[in-house]
Amino acid sequence: MHIDLSHVIVDGMVTYPGLPVPIVADHLSREAAEEIYGPGITFQIGVVTICTNTGTYLDVPFHRFADGHDLTALDLARVAGVDAVRIDCRGQRIIDLTDVDASSLTGRAVLIWTDHSTHWGTPNYFESHPALSATAAEKLVAAGVACVGIDSLNIDATEGTGERPVHTTLLGDQIPIIEHLTNLATVTDEGFTFTAVPPKIEGAGTFTVRAFATF
């Protein structure tokens, strides 16, 4: 069984304030196709103009570091069919993972469940979002996790500072980050695998993914 953990991408939606919104349109409409192929013979070819940080997306080191690897060098073993754990962090604004046994996280996809995704599509999604602390990021690196995902606006706290210690620490250790997950309430704490694979784009440090859990 598969459970989708990705947001739907629609024309004009806002993922992060200030970033370009996606444009989803026809390159070839069905009406135009009939003029080419004949009556009743229709095809649709779409065109999508999209910021790499749209919907549910994955970060690799190039997103943060000029000499970090881009999407073409992403290790699929970190993001495809990876044994996963969901950590319930609901009600926490800054998440330290103090009570989490780091030894249980080695080699696993760690999904931080904040339930902030319930605000997706509303102004509340962009305000007072939960995030990891620098200490939590260091703990995840020490544990040797495969990747880290969160169902929030950003894995770092963003209000009042431009510093991004969680991105710096995780991406500096080659650990991919997946932001804007959703539906984490529908998975269990353990007993599933996680997949979130982006296209293989040279020169890109982030891109939209179809993230899902498999039971």
Image (cartoon, rainbow, N blue to C red):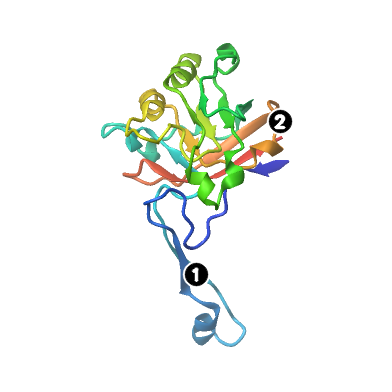
Q: Is residue 6 visible?
A: no
Quick one: label 1 or label 2, which is nearer the N terminus?
A: 1
Question: Which residue shows up at 40% across the image and 49% down it?
Answer: 52
Quadrant for the C terminus in the image: top right
Crowd around label 1: few <14 · some 14–19 · many ≥20 (10 Å): few
Q: Please determine whether, in this image, residue 61 is positioned above or below residue 206.
A: above
Q: Please determine whether, in this image, residue 152 is positioned above or below residue 96.
A: below
Q: Position of residue 68 (x, y in %)?
A: 31, 32
Instruction: Left or right? Give the position of 151 relative to 63.
Output: right
Q: Please determine whether, in this image, residue 42 is positioned above or below residue 180.
A: below
| Amino acid at circle 2 | Thr
215 or 98: nearer the eye?
98
122 or 55: nearer the eye?
122
Q: Nearer the viewer, mark 1 or mark 2?
A: 2
| Amino acid at circle 1 | Ile
Question: Which residue shows up at 45% across the image and 32% down it?
Answer: 176
Say which residue label 2 marks: 188
Question: Which residue shows up at 52% across the image and 45% down it?
Answer: 125
Q: Position of residue 138 (x, y in %)?
A: 43, 17
Question: Which residue shows up at 52% across the image and 29% down it?
Answer: 93
**Please, what secondary structure does the residue beneath circle 1 have?**
strand
Quadrant for the N terminus in the image: top right
**Please, what secondary structure does the residue beneath circle 2 have?**
loop
Say which residue label 1 marks: 45
